[in-house]
Image: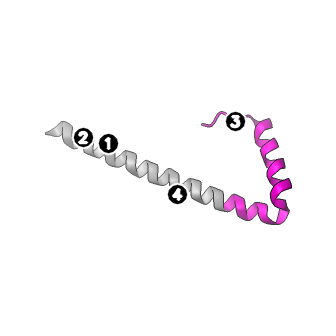
Amino acid sequence: MFNISFGELFAFGIIALIILGPEKLPQTLRTVLFKYRAIKNQLNKIQNDLENELELIELK
């Protein structure tokens, strides 16, 4: 999806571990993933609403 290799993901993880430390990293990851999931769900809802509206327009 984002075209990120394992090496880049690993480097990002090491940098995040250095900056945040082992105490804050798990909570930060949970927060980021929660926000990502919320945004993804909202985008899916918008896409479904648009598809439904387009179907209604085609029926008219």
Q: Which mark is residue 4?
A: 3
Alpha carbons under labels 2 and 4: distance apart: 26 Å
Q: Position of residue 48 (x, y in %)?
A: 36, 47
Is 47 left or right of 30, judged from the image as shown? left
Is 57 left or right of 5, judged from the image as shown? left
> Residue at horizontal 70%, vertical 35%?
4
**Figure quadrant of the N terminus:** top right
Q: Nearer the viewer, mark 3 or mark 2?
A: 3
Alpha carbons under labels 4 and 3: distance apart: 22 Å
Earlier residue among tags 3 and 2: 3
Amino acid type, label 3? Ile
- Displayed quadrant of residue 18: bottom right
Badge 3 element = loop
Q: Determine if the magenta segment contains residue 19.
A: yes
Amino acid type, label 2? Glu
Q: Are marks 4 and 3 in contact (CB under 8 Å)?
A: no
Q: Which residues are magenta?
A: 1-30
Q: Which mark is residue 11?
A: none
- Magenta: main secondary structure: helix
Badge 2 element = helix
Q: Which residue is mark 1?
A: 51
Q: Which residue is mark 4?
A: 38
> Residue at horizontal 67%, vertical 61%?
30
